[in-house]
Each structure stands twice: as C-alpha cells, then as structure tokens.
Amino acid sequence: MSGSDLLDRRLVVVTGKGGVGKSTVAAALATLAARRGKRVLVAEVDARERVAPMLGGRPSGPVVRQVLPHVSTVNVDPRHALEEYALMVVKVRAIYQAVFENRVVRFFLRAVPSLAETLMLGKILHEARSESGGKPRWDLVIVDAPATGHAVQLLGVPKALLDTVPAGPLRRDAQWMQALLTDPARTSVVLVSLPEEMPVSETVELDAQVRDILGLPRGPVFVNAMPDARFTPEEQERLRGLTGSEPPVGPAARAAVLQAGRQERAAEQVARLREALGRPLVTLPLLATERWGRRAVERIADAMEGRV
Amino acid sequence: MGALLRSLSDKRIAVVVGSGGVGKTSLSAAIALSRAMDGGRVLVCTIDPARRLASALGLASLGNTEARIPDEAFARAGLAPKGELHAMMLDVKRTWDDLVARHAPDAATRDRILGNRIYQQVSGALAGSQEYMAMEKLYELSTERDYDLIVLDTPPTAHALDFLEAPDRILDFVGNETARKLFAPAIGAGRFGARLVQLGTGYAAKILSRFTGSDVLHDIGEFLGQFQGMYDGFKERASAVRTLLTRPEVGFVLVASPSPLSVDEALYFHDHLRTAGMPIAGSVANRVTPDLWPFPGALPTQEALGDALGPAGDGGGDLPARLHRTLSENQAFAHADARELERLRRGASGAHVAVPQLEGDVHDLSGLAELSRHL
C-alpha cells in the first residue's frame, strides 16, 4: 500500500512501543481525516484517555462522545463492552442484570480466557461495521491500541479463539472479527516508532509479528519526533570548536552540537528502519512544544498531509 | 557512587518499575552491572519481549535460564568486574508449567492441567499472567539461588499497578469459590466426562453458554476442578511473594521520563507501594534535557548571537537565527523537564537521581557503565 489511501480504510489500528507517541499519531490521523470531511471515531483501549484531551475536549469515558465536529472518541473498557455485548445477545436489561450483576458470573466471565480483550476488540470492530440509515456510522475508526506486546495480544484474540474455541457464538464472533481485521481493503495496521535504536529494533520485530503471526494488512510506519537537519557539516565543525566559549555563543553552540548529534543519530536509525522494513516511512517533526494540545496535533497533521 | 546505588547497596532485590518506554530495561542492567563491578554476584532478570536487555549486554539472545556475561564481553568494553553479572529472560509459559509441576499432586494431574485449553490461555495470554510469573520467578530465584543482588526489570504494564495486583487477581480466578460452586456438578461428575447437561442446571450457566458455547464452560469446569487441589499451594506461595516484597532487603526503583504522564504514573505507583508497605529505594528521572542557560536574564537574541559570532560567523546569513532557535528549543525542553523532575522529587521518597540525555542509545556494556555513573 502506498499510504495515500490509508484514511479510506474503515479501520486503522495504531500501535508501537510504549512512549513513542501513538496517541499523538492517532489524534493527528483523526484530524487529517476530519479535514477531508470524514466522520471519525478514535477508540482508546482501557487507557488513561489522551486523545480527547489532546483534541481540546474532555475525556469521553466508555460512551462515545463527540469532541470536534467530525471526531468522536471513546475509551473502551471491558466492563462496559461486556454490558453492551450482553445486551445485544440477551436483549432484556432485567435479564442482563439478573445474570451479569451477579458477582459469581462476573468472575466467571473474567475467567474466560481473553474475554476482556475479545469484548473490547469486539466493541471496536462492531463500531467499525455498524450502520445507521443504510450508511456506515463512521467513515473511519482509528484504534489507539496498547503498546507492542499487549497490542499483539489484543489483535491476536480472534485468531486465538478460532484456534481453540469449538463451534458456538464466540467462534462466530471470532470469524467476522478476523474477516474484518485481515481484509486489506478495510483494515490497516500502522506502526509508530521513534528514531532511536531500541524503538527501531522493536518496530522491526513488531512489523514481522503483524505480518507473520497476526497476518494483518500493514500500512505506513510513522517515525515520530524526527529532528530536522539544521546545520551543515562545516557549521557543525565550527560550532564544536565554540562550545567552550563564553555565553552567549558557548551555550548556543552546545545546544547546536546536541541538536546536530541527535539529528545525525536519528537519521542513522531511520535509514536502518527503512532498510529493514523495505518500504517508505512517514517521518514527523520533533516539536519544541511543552504541552501536547490541539495546536501541536494540527502541526503533526500538517506534516502528514499529502503523505498518508 | 550516586545516591540511588548507595540506597540499593544493602539490598538483595531491586524491582525496577515504571510505565513503558522510560528505559527500565537499560537502567536495570546498569544497576546490576554496577554491583557486579564492585564484586557482587548479580542477576538481572527481564521479562521484556523485545530482547532489549540481550542486545544491551551484547548477547545474541537470552533464555529462561541464567547466563553469565562472559569476561571477553567485559574486556571488549574495557571493564574488569570484580564480581559476576548474570542475565536471563523470563519465559512466562515455562514458569507457569514449572509452578504447576511443583504443586500438582501427581504426574497425571499435572499432564491433564498442562493439556487443558483454558490453562494454555491462562498461562499464555491472560492479562496479569506475565506480572504474576515475574513475581513468582523472583521468589524462586531469591530463595533457591545465592545472588548478592537480583534486579527485576518488570513488564511494561499499561497500568503500573497491574504488577502488584496480578497475583491476587489470577488467584481469584483459579481458586474462585463462587465459580467452583457454580461448577460443582461438573467437578463432582468426574474430571473427564462433564457435560453441559450437568452444569446447566443453573440459569446463569445456560445464559453463559450462549456467549461461549458449552465446550468452553466444560473446559473451565474441568480446569477449576483440577486446580482445586493445588490452590492452597499457589495461594501460600503468592502470599510468601508478597511478604518477601515488604522485607527491608528489597528496594523498589521508580523510573520515569520527565513527562507529565510518566511522572503521574510513577507517583501513583509510589503511593500504592507505600500503602502496601513495600520499601522504596528511590526514583530515576531518565533522559533529562540539560539546562544550557542557567543564567539570570533572558536568552540571547539572534542579533546578540550574530554580534558575538562576528562577521565570519554569518555563514549563509541565518546561522545566528538557527542558533537562537536551537537554544530556545533546548531551553523549552529543559524547563519542561525540570518542572516534572521537581514534581517527582517532591512526591517520591528515597534517593532521587536524574539521568541526562546521553549521546546515543545505550546498547552495550560500556554504555551501561556510563549510565550507571549517573545513578
């Protein structure tokens, strides 16, 4: 996939190592899709909610809430996902309460392997295929997925169920979930990385897991917080000689040498990632912003414009 | 030796905790390396699936058993440790299997549990399973080996507290009284032939089977039945682990990056550790941007920089402007970091250290040695 049609998918799953800026990329993708007139839902997975606050709104909690004209968010948690799912099956709230408010059964349901993950993923995928008035309810559902290991666990749920669960309602759910997840026309898994050694190594491994273990369609790989090449080699040479100078030149030269060193190491890591993955990367600028608000997200979305 | 290493110097166990991506793995290895340099026999145990520790130690891979870092690897890094450094990666599934083998009354029960589908899910994928096994392994290592120090690099949990609560939650599951009652007919009917007909006397079981299919219920009944006899053993062990973690020879190390979310998480964890009576050795703020303008007065303007550089410094015309921007950005990062650092210092007890952003990633023994100089 070239990446140019990423936002035409129905489901975009954003994952990567912890702390690489997944929520920022998810929020920026949502912003970009909204600029193109799409109705977007961003789903966080049992997280301390970040996307809605980044977009200038209040946290949504477990109920879908609109934060911007075209963007809604939700923080999916197992308990509410269970309630919604159960009500779809049982239909009558009184029966649901009789059965599911019972501590015995709640325990039991938690005990069913990966049921929490199944319910959360089921809730998200249900949103991705739900319709109202003959039209899809959302043009695009973006999942701000958990970090590497937990994301593989979450996305691997339908396949694991298909491997282990005999015929029954759970298996039928696993089947449609897996069909949606593996359909390259509807779904894309995008990875977020940083231009640093360990995140790059982990991204390369995660990419292989998405391909070989999960078998899911892979979208572009975003490299967050990329410093810009700001000083020529000659300038760097000269500035290195000035780091011991009196202020103001000394401190400024030290800042410049640090920046240039970061940039050089980052560029090496980006090259390594590009070579290992064998496909283009989308680099996003390092912003000197102290607070990750809507303005910063808009700037990241600007940087994505024309590239996804 | 820095404040953190000093506060760990009389500890036998260091548990390194913090949210994902803050550098726990490298810091764990650096703590371990430092004690090994001073003559200790040290083990660092990681659960990290990305094999970061292996690459940092210059090993191709790490297994479920302890491997000693060879002298040649130290020699290549110009290091001559007085002690020994060992490393291992926790294999969650293997640790579960060992635990079952330890507690099973006989080989037949052990094999039936190991073959049960529910058990396979629990040991492989159940949330909290990694955390539980990390604690279990720590207990095993600390009671059955004679390391001077064991450093545990904890899993990158979404919520740091998972680590503390996981054993209780998992034990609640495998030994749940109420669930066992629900399945009493199946358990009573023998370990093999339970059918939903036997379970399904309860209304709840009937409704549940609509979600999961009856075979899953059957598997769970069988699983709970088999675990019943072993539950007390598991429970005793988990309680021993908890007790171990409150002993003074243990030190928790909180790791945070200087970002609001990461510091929040560390402080949250700190307060819960305290409530649980677990000793806190200190906190690390990792990758802190240096303050390059610790002077009174505003940052220099680009004109001031241009004047100071002189006419020859005017390369391409806008070098002063770029320098001005670079210094301003550095200071913006540095000030934001300093605020978070201060919050961590005020909120957390024990030693406090700040590790500056180092040149390059830590990816070998000399990098780890350099890192330990900041601890």
Image: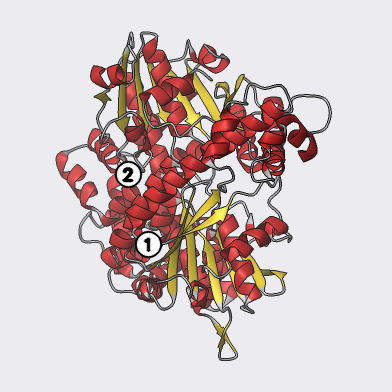
One can see residue B271 in this view = no
Looking at the image, which is closer to me, B256 or A271? A271
Q: Is residue A107 left or right of residue A276?
A: right
One can see residue A81 in this view = yes
Q: Quadrant of residue B331?
A: top right
**How much space separates mark 2 and mark 1, taking CA atoms?**
52 Å
x then y, percent, for residue A107: 47, 54
- Is residue A125 positioned above or below A110 on the image? below
- Residue visible at 57% across and 14% down? B3
Q: Which residue is the site of mark 1?
A: A279
Looking at the image, which is closer to me, B82 or B265? B82
Q: Which residue is the site of mark 2?
A: B228
- Is residue B350 positioned above or below B18 on the image? above
Q: Quadrant of residue A165?
A: bottom left
Q: In what element is the residue under mark 2?
A: helix
x then y, percent, for residue B194: 25, 61
Q: Count the marks: how many?
A: 2
x then y, percent, for residue A73: 63, 66
Chain holding disc 2: B
Looking at the image, which is closer to me, B132 or A102? B132
